[in-house]
C-alpha cells in the first residue's frame, strides 16, 4: 500500500468535532473578538486623546524649540500607537475569524 493511501485512510477517521471552527469554538471566538475589540478601542481612544493633548502642547509651546519638538514627537508616537492598535484589531479579527 502506498504512503498516500495510508494517509488518506487515516484522514478519513479524523473527528471533525475537535477541529477549529466546528461547533462550540465559535461562541468562544466571538467573545474573544468582542473583548479584544473593546481593548483595542480603548487603546485607540487613548492614542487619539494623546494626539489632542500633544497638539495643545504644540500650540502652547510659544516658539520654544524644545517644547515644540517634544510635542511633535508625542504626536508622532501617538499616531504610531493608533496605527498599531488599528492593525492589531484587524489582525485579531482576521485570525479569530479563521477559527
Image (spheres, grey):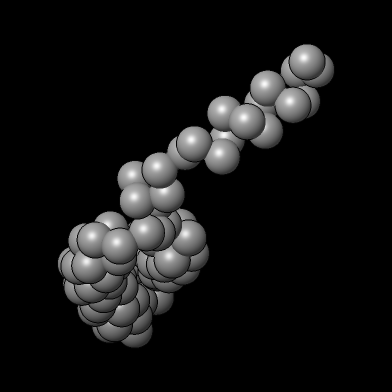
Identify the residue at horizontal 31%, vertical 78% (top origin).
48
Q: Where residue 72 sits in the image (x, y, percent)?
A: 43, 67
| Viewer-side residue, 94 vs 58 | 94
Identify the residue at horizontal 28%, vertical 58% (top origin).
25
In the rendered view, tell whether residue 21 sits above or below residue 18: below
| Viewer-side residue, 37 vs 49 | 37
Residue projecting furthest to the front = 1
Residue 77 in sight in this render: no
Residue 33 in sight in this render: yes
Identify the residue at horizontal 56%, vertical 40% (top origin).
12
Q: Where residue 84 sits in the image (x, y, percent)?
A: 44, 60
- Left or right: residue 77 versus residue 8 is left
Q: Where residue 86 sits in the image (x, y, percent)?
A: 43, 70
In the rendered view, tell whether residue 18 sits above or below residue 97: above
Where, quadrant-wise, is the C terminus in this rendering?
bottom left
Task: Determine which quarter of the picture holds residue 53.
Answer: bottom left
Where, quadrant-wise, is the N terminus in this rendering?
top right
Identify the residue at horizontal 63%, vertical 31% (top origin).
9
In the rendered view, tell whether residue 9 sits above or below residue 47: above
| Viewer-side residue, 77 vs 43 | 43
Amino acid at each position: 500500500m502506498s504512503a498516500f493511501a495510508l494517509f488518506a485512510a487515516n484522514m478519513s477517521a479524523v473527528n471533525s468535532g475537535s477541529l477549529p471552527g466546528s461547533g462550540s469554538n465559535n461562541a468562544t471566538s466571538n467573545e474573544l473578538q468582542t473583548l479584544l475589540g473593546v481593548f483595542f478601542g480603548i487603546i485607540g481612544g487613548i492614542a487619539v486623546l494623546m494626539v489632542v493633548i500633544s497638539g495643545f502642547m504644540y500650540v502652547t509651546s510659544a516658539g520654544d524649540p524644545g517644547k515644540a519638538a517634544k510635542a511633535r514627537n508625542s504626536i508622532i508616537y501617538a499616531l504610531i500607537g493608533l496605527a498599531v492598535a488599528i492593525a492589531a484589531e484587524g489582525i485579531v479579527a482576521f485570525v479569530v475569524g479563521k477559527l
